[in-house]
Image (tube, helix red, strand yellow):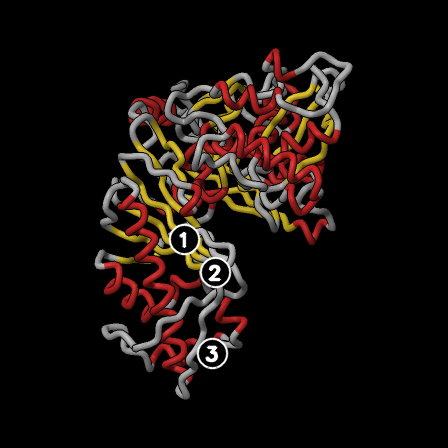
Amino acid sequence: MFFNTEKSTLLIFLSLNFILGFNKPLFLGYDFGTSGVRICLIDENYDVKFENSINWKDKKVNVNDALAWKNAQYELLESIPLDYRKSIHSICSSGTSASCLIYDINQNKISREPRMYDYNVLKENENIGKIVMNKLNNFCPNGNAANAPTSTLAKVLAWQEEEPFKSTERLIHQADYLSHTLTLHDEFTSEWHNSLKLGYDVHELVYPTWLYDCIASSSSDSSDSSNSSNNELLPHRVVAPGTYVGQVHSSISSRYDLNENCQVVSGTTDSIAAFIASGANQIGQAVSSLGSTLAIKLLSSTYADDSTRGVYSHRLNHNQWLVGGASNVGCAILRKLEFDTNELIELSKQIDPDTDIDLNYYPLCNQGERFPINDASKQPILEPIPTDRADYLKGILQSIAYIEKKGYDVLLELGADQVTEVITAGGGSTNEMWTAMRQRVLQVPTTKADNIDAAFGAAKLAIQPFEND
């Protein structure tokens, strides 16, 4: 693992407890995603002891229902066998990036309902969205991850335009809120990963002055004291993922028969939790997710960031960065072009992965690309269409492979480390022919990830309960 050099000390201590007759310690990870919530319980060797999940559709609730999050959290906790529950040493949660809400600490309740990762201020309210984007363009440094209509900061500014914040209101990210529901602390703690799109400076590990100035620039008048002047709106602590946050509150540990010393550690985003789950932990190792779209993440010793090319970096610890971007190309185009599963299997057997075909596509489902170029007007290129369906499939998969390579080339160009190995996740990872083709194009070893479950990644992060901020 790459998060904390003190891990071995912890494991020695925990192993001694086990030898002396105490219960073997277990570590619980939650992943709150777009379709539901999953849990994964592991031991210190990363062996999975228990898993379970809840689907939002089955519960007939929406993904942005914070009460449903909390209810699911407790329901899944209660589903864990009693002996395992008593052995849980620490808990960690991952949530969707830039999903946040506003909490009133006086009323002890949510005052403004969650706005999720895909909430776009321009699409929700064009007038307010234009005001917000004008502020972001005026205050955000060039290339900053907060300068986007779906960023956490954009949502904060939109809330402020709709109704000025009260001095008792606090911003909290999804994963941090779920940690709070376990510790019941008076103040909120956040971490580097969820705070990136708020504008937190992951180099200096502080809130930058421009961020406070941006929030203070609201065009609304408030009869209440301004949060922007006393800086109370933002989480007081922003720590490294995996940092000890506090113990599970006694009322909760008693209700669910947890160890009274059960701890909560700061979480992360779902995509980074999936990266952690993959086992990639060496500089140069990368994870390509071949799902509906293509996303790449590279473990680098250096930082790279350029929002004009769809690239930004998450800090993993004090000298490692997770650099990446997400393209709009991916496996969704195969469904759009009506390749069914059986056809994909049969046609793939006819394709030679060691040669190129003279077809240069840009297989977007719709107009617009984010990475490795950021071009809202980028048009799909899906012609000419060969008579042989296998050739058509080869041309599409080959084009995605070269876009993937271009992505890693852009990261290198911006200062990230050279990719040395690509671990593949997502539905595309099961196609052995495509893996061989991609390995030839990328010119590095390319393998399938054993596990990319974000709940498993959060559980691995839960094995790091040390104060390291």
* Identity of the residue drawn at 53% across and 41% down: 31
Q: Is residue 104 above or below residue 195?
A: above
Q: Is residue 231 above or below residue 29?
A: above
* Residue that badge 3 annotates: 342
Judge depth for marks 3 and 2 and give the one in front.
2
Q: Residues within 10 Å of mark 3 (few under 14, many from 20)?
A: few
* Residue that badge 1 annotates: 373
* Residue that badge 2 annotates: 378
Residue 60, given in percent of the width and then of the height, sits at 74, 50
Mark sitting on residue 34: none
The answer to whether one can see residue 346 in this image is yes
Whichever of callouts 3 and 2 sits on the residue coming sooner in the sequence is: 3
* Identity of the residue drawn at 66% across and 35% down: 70
Q: Which quadrant does the C terminus fall into? A: top left
Q: Which quadrant does the N terminus fall into? A: top left
Whole-number angstrom distance, CA of label 3 to CA of label 2 = 31 Å
Residue 326, given in percent of the width and then of the height, sits at 44, 51
In front here: 281 or 335? 335
Residue 294 lies left or right of residue 227; in this view the side is left
Q: Are marks 1 and 2 in contact (CB under 8 Å)?
A: yes
Q: Secondary structure at mark 3?
A: helix
Q: What kind of residue is marked 3?
A: Asn
Q: Secondary structure at mark 1?
A: loop
The answer to whether one can see residue 26 in this image is no
